[in-house]
Amino acid sequence: MPMQERQEILKPVSNLFIASSVLVALFLNALPWGGIWLVLRPDFVAVVMLYWCTHKPYRMGIGLSWAVGILSDVNDASLFGQHALSYTILAFGGVVLNRRIRMFDLREQTTQVFLILLATYSVYAVVNWQVNGQLAWSYFLGCLTSTLLWIPVSALFQSVRQRRVERE
Amino acid sequence: MEGTQTFQVFNRGPSPVARLVFFSVLSLLLMFVDARYRYLETTRSLISELVYPVQRLATLPGVLWQQTEEFFVSHNRLLEENKELHRQHEADMVELVQWQAMLRENRQLHTLLSLQQRSQPNVKFAEIVYAERDVFRRKILIDKGSAANIQEGQVVMDDKGIVGQITRVYPWLSEVTLITEKDHAVPVQIQRNGLRSIAFGAGDTSHLALRYMPVSADIVKGDVLVTSGIDGLYPPGIPVARVDTIERDAAYPFARIVCTPLGGVDEHRYLMVLSSTSALPPRPEETPAPSRQKSKKMGGH
């Protein structure tokens, strides 16, 4: 498996890198999206968290995802715990399936990632439906764009981590 | 390390399933407490101070874009705009003088009739920091918070009509729920004949609905709805919406009335926050109805 071999060369990532990537994702989510762009906006935070949960499951786990979810809840003015719950599910999927996902190459990973993200989005939508009695199907478009974002985000992080090795 | 599943060398703490269950239950509890009792507002505003730098930073691209746009505005356009504003100002001045005379007269009449005086609402200007970021919700955040003495429940409007109501106050920001948010209610009155009703948000940005109006109600297309001021929260007489379509179906007891909000609910950058302090006498206590379950939401059309 070429993927597995390549990963062994990757240097361990610093905590600072993980934290700043999550902060950047929060920032991207907070940009003034509106109208159709809001519907199509991928959930940057979810994708970044899923990357760290699958690649560094002992550093970014369910508890930290939950905490980031609480930050997102404040950021989005949603119900307290709504993002937290969906990101908990996301992290669980990532942590439990991390070996399985890393076995595939990037393109094959997307199907697995799509299912995890779909579960995450569904949890959020169901909570909203229960509390506000309203279900917007267009919301699930964001799940598709988030899945599409998986490839560039993983490629980006992978290349950053490799460059660190080359610099040595 | 092939046998990691069965033989754990390092103690990694509780298993993922245990963590999943713990944090899910915690989230559910938080949601329940937040939705039902709203106990967590102080926690929320504490955490909001953590997130505030990110939020502010996120508005930067928009602000920069606007500043570049402003920088390249042509001299001619500014002159023209200035002229237009002057004309508008003069026209408004005439109306204002008349209005003030009328206000004096009205006050005098109120005193003669020994009615309660209407208090003058206090106006604060605020800028929209960002619009709704959740597909499900109709909310905006403005750049004045409890530091500027904004309080929950205050009314937010633009120059044309009501936009929404303050629902949550942070130290430097506050959250406005738009009148088009699903099930948000505004007590209104038809300007033409004074008929009272309640306008509900329909859940999309461009519509309000008048529910529970009998088929025979005297409403025609084009009627303007203004706030009735009956609940003491909204000052009376502020435009809210215009009636758009009326469907009278004899099969239903109520007419289906759809209105368009007059205020630019999702248009402008600058808004006004009214802090009316009308002192209504306290509401008489209701005798508790025998075991009536409070319905969670109202059945919408």
Image: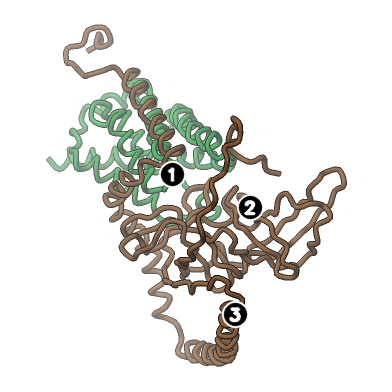
Chain colours: A green, B brown
Residue type (three-letter) at the residue carrying disc 2: Phe
Residue identifier under label 3:
B112
Report the side of B138 relative to B215 (left or right). left
Q: CA distance from mark 2 to mark 3?
A: 37 Å
Where does residue B47 sit, x and y in percent of width and height? 29, 46
Residue at left offset 45%, top offset 38%: B35
- Along the line of sight, the residue nearer the viewer: B260 or B278: B278
Residue type (three-letter) at the residue carrying disc 3: Leu
User: Which of the labelled discs sits on residue B200, or is there none?
Assistant: 2
Chain label for disc 2: B
In the image, residue B75 above or below residue B254: below
The answer to whether marks 1 and 3 sit on the same chain is: no
Residue identifier under label 1:
A78
Where does residue B231 sit, x and y in percent of width and height? 56, 58
Whichever of callouts 2 and 3 sits on the residue coming sooner in the sequence is 3
Chain label for disc 3: B
